[in-house]
Image (cartoon, rainbow, N blue to C red):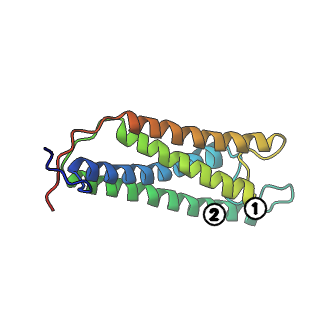
Amino acid sequence: MSTVRPFEITTATRTSRAVKTAGVIFGMGAGGLIDGILFHQLLQWHHLICFSCHPGATIDDVRRNIFADGLFGVVALGLTVAGVTRLWSALRMGGAHLPGRFLPGAAAVGWGVFNLVEGVIDHHLLQIHHVHPGPGQLGWDLAFLASGALLVLGGRRLMREARLPEAVPVRT
């Protein structure tokens, strides 16, 4: 006969929820940092708000681009730090050890959520920028959304395949 009550939260469940939350937040921040570094800085395809994405752009337009990208980077870094902080807190709780694929899966879900939310809002609804403006920009925007969906699906699969340890009830 089991001593676990139907709605009792086990150590493994509590730890997995905390690590999942931490991983998703971390993944959202890391996805934002990767987006900003890759698309805004290295490839220079777009900025958060494309003030200078037209032929008559001034140096003041470029400065506003850099400032908006900086704010974007601060938010992404804040999410990354928040995710690491929550992960640290989850690990300090002790309890169950999670399989190695669990955290990367949660981070992939977070990155995918970032791509989906940022892509739908910035690229399609507000149209403040596109992944790669110009001919074929819709294709680039849709590919960005598809990458988000694949990251969410792949991350969920990694987490689902990670077997949690046997349930051990937590005494509260």
Task: Please tell me in which quadrant of the rendered image residue 54 appears.
Answer: bottom right
Q: Residue flagged by tag 2: what amino acid is it? A: Ala
The answer to whether one can see residue 25 in this image is yes
Q: CA distance from mark 2 to mark 1?
A: 10 Å
Examine the rendered structure and indicate whether residue 41 appears above or below residue 63.
above
User: Could you tell me residue 34's position as x and y percent?
Assistant: 54, 45
The secondary element bearing badge 2 is classed as: helix
In the image, is 24 to the left or to the right of 141? left
Q: Residue at x 42, y 35 (%)?
A: 158
Q: Which of the labelled discs sits on residue 68, or is there none?
A: 2
- Dot 2 surroundings within 10 Å: few (below 14), some, or many (20 or more)? some
In the image, is 107 to the left or to the right of 72? left
- Dot 1 surroundings within 10 Å: few (below 14), some, or many (20 or more)? many
Q: Are marks 2 and 1 in contact (CB under 8 Å)?
A: yes
Examine the rendered structure and indicate whether residue 50 appears above or below residue 97.
below
Examine the rendered structure and indicate whether residue 35 appears above or below residue 147.
below
User: Could you tell me residue 82's position as x and y percent?
Assistant: 39, 59
Q: Quadrant of the N terminus?
A: top left
**Which of disc 1 and disc 2 is earlier in sequence?**
1
Q: Quadrant of the C terminus?
A: bottom left
